[in-house]
Amino acid sequence: MPQRAIPYLFLRGGTSRGPYFLRDDLPADEATLSRVLVRALGAGHTLNIDGIGGGAAVTTKVAMLSPGSDGWADVDYFFAQVAVEDALVDYRPSCGNILSGVGPAALESGLVQPSGDTTRVRIHAVNTGARVEAIVATPGGLVEYNGNERIDGVPGTASPIPLHFMDVAGSVCGALLPTGHARERINGIDVTCMDVAMPMVIARAVDFGLSGYESREELDANKEFFARMEAIRTEAGTRMGLGDVSRSVTPKFGLLAPPRSEGTIATRYFMPWSCHPTMAVTGGQCLATAVLHPGTVADGVARRPEGSPARVRLEHPAGSMDVTATYTFADGRFELASAGILRTARLLARGELMVPASAWNDA
């Protein structure tokens, strides 16, 4: 069977990894694109044995890049979450960890030219409409991957990539609080339905009989919890205006507990059918905003910082992640201006990815 070669870069972005393509090198229509990505990643098998996926949701992610089209951005970033065990692709969410590699990938592919020892790359997240500025070290006109920045969930150190997110409140549902409530009750559980960078349903771990400090493996093995969580998540998706989300990875789900160490709050983030090994960048922004917004399920659980900008430290299974948020709260109205996160990335491979030609033709 003939195969087609697709140029690609393979990067670790934050605590995720996946292929970075130029959008023009892929099929234009979504149905064909999905078939190609399923074959490229090997979706439909627990090990993704016939593709380059890694058998986990954090390693079956795809970035597709093109020149900026909105008059502001240098590059458009279109994200796809490819399933592990099902031949499915979801284009609803975005991914902030994979976004960490967009600046380096744009420079490596020639979409953006270096502008000195550091290069500011303006990114338009196509899936959600968010605008993000990434600062990439480019001494001598080359992307610098070596450095002293350490992020929990990734071994070693690398060059820091600060990310500044704008226009992330209500980016998918149209409002920071899509249901109009900071807290509501679904199936006997108090939840906060919030849309900041990623639509989320957030609850307290104790309300599920959990401590909130369980390991990823312990949570993934708790089928009773996942059944309760999924029922709440799907109902919340309807209330948030997302329709039937039973086959969509959005909204995501988050659990909160009092901090165990020096953090602001302890968190567990679900993708949604498994626990994230660390913390998603998009989900981290949403959880941090829930901490800062009065009246949410974070009240009485978090050590809420005072003033703006505020640094929120989210404890996760592998350590912690800091989110710096700029916001206002006046006359009972909360408004988020921006959220900043520090990530790293590394180019792992470059070349051509081989995909069976039948992916372009299968009905």
Image (spheres, rainbow, N blue to C red):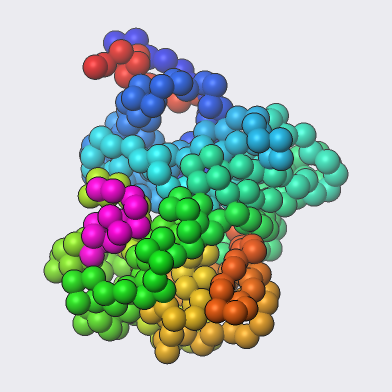
Query: Measuring 64% from the left and 43% from the top, which residue is drawn there?
Result: 123
Residue 236 on the magenta span: yes
Residue 268 in view here? no
Residue placed most toward the observer, 253 or 8 = 253
- Answer with left or right where residue 360 lies relative to residue 139: left
- Answer with left or right where residue 139 lies relative to residue 312: right
Query: Measuring 77% from the left and 34% from the top, which residue is drawn there?
Result: 113
The segment highlighted magenta reads 232-244
Residue 231 location (% of width, % of height): 19, 62
Residue 127 location (% of width, % of height): 49, 42
Residue placed most toward the observer, 115 or 142 = 115
Q: Quadrant of residue 362?
A: top left
Residue placed most toward the observer, 54 or 93 = 93
> Is 35 situated above or below 144?
above
Query: What secondary structure is the stretch in magenta mostly built from?
Result: helix
Residue 255 location (% of width, % of height): 35, 73
Of the 4 image quadrants, the one containing the C terminus is top left
Query: Measuring 49% from the left and 81% from the top, which residue is drawn there?
Result: 294
Residue 110 in view here? yes
Q: In which quarter of the image is residue 159?
A: bottom right
> Is 70 situated above or below 56?
above
Residue 321 on the magenta span: no
